[in-house]
Image (spheres, coloured by chain):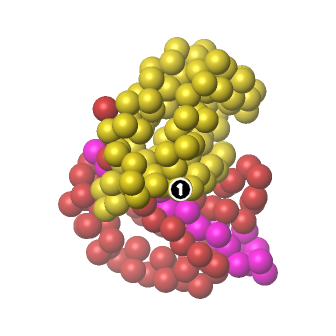
Chain colours: A yellow, B red
Amino acid sequence: MIKVVAKCKLKPDVKIEEYLHDARELVAETRKEEGCITYALHQDINDPSIITMLEEWVDEEALNQHNKTEHVNRIVPELRKLRESTEVNIYREVE
Amino acid sequence: MIKVVAKCKLKPDVKIEEYLHDARELVAETRKEEGCITYALHQDINDPSIITMLEEWVDEEALNQHNKTEHVNRIVPELRKLRESTEVNIYREVE
């Protein structure tokens, strides 16, 4: 299993609900993917403009397939327009 | 439930195994805490010097109690000496 933390800081003039509307569609479509274990939107409790996707995938191949889907290629570029920054890390657990 | 992502970048001259030795003790002690759901060490698959704790707590009070424990106050300052940077975010899931 691999885990992804995709931390996004929204632009100051962006309405959070506008961002979440599109992000929720991405969540709903992504959860249908076979290799997706968890894919959930989170908001920083101290800074509501930080919206982070916490993800779990069966393996790297599943994540690569995800990045080629129609919903990622349609929705993610729209979400990026609303972000000031995006920071993505891919992790494996250390025993 | 709240989730914590504590992302740490180690100093360039630090041996990762040295860091993990102490971090594993922190994991073992923390998992005994009543309010701890998940507490696990992760390493970035593209940059081994990025070591991130992914945590789940029953509520903020459990996290506050954690930060007052003997093991946190003894081990975390030692870990911090080995880090270049530490970035902590506390999240709640957005439905």
Say left or right for A88 vs B16: left
Q: Secondary structure at mark 1?
A: strand
Q: Is residue A41 left or right of residue B83?
A: left
Pointer 1: what residue?
A84
Q: Nearer the viewer, residue A88 or B21?
A: A88
Residue at 55% over, 62% down: B7
Residue drawn at x 25%, y 67% is: B65
Q: Amino acid at mark 1?
A: Glu
Q: What's the residue at 33%, 54% (across, down)?
A: A48
Is A5 within the magenta? no
Chain letter of disc 1 in the image: A
Give the position of the N terminus of chain B as an image quadrant: top left
Structural crowding at the residue carrying mark 1, measured as other residues with C-alpha within 10 Å and reported as few (<14), some (14–19) or many (≥20): some
- Residue B46, position as x, y percentages in the image: 77, 52
In percent of width and height, residue B82 lies at: 64, 80
Instruction: Please report the bounds of the magenta region as a residue range.
Output: B1-20
Q: Residue at x 46, y 65 (%)?
A: B88
Q: Answer yes or no: is residue B54 visible.
A: no
- Across and down, in percent, residue A28 comes to 45, 20
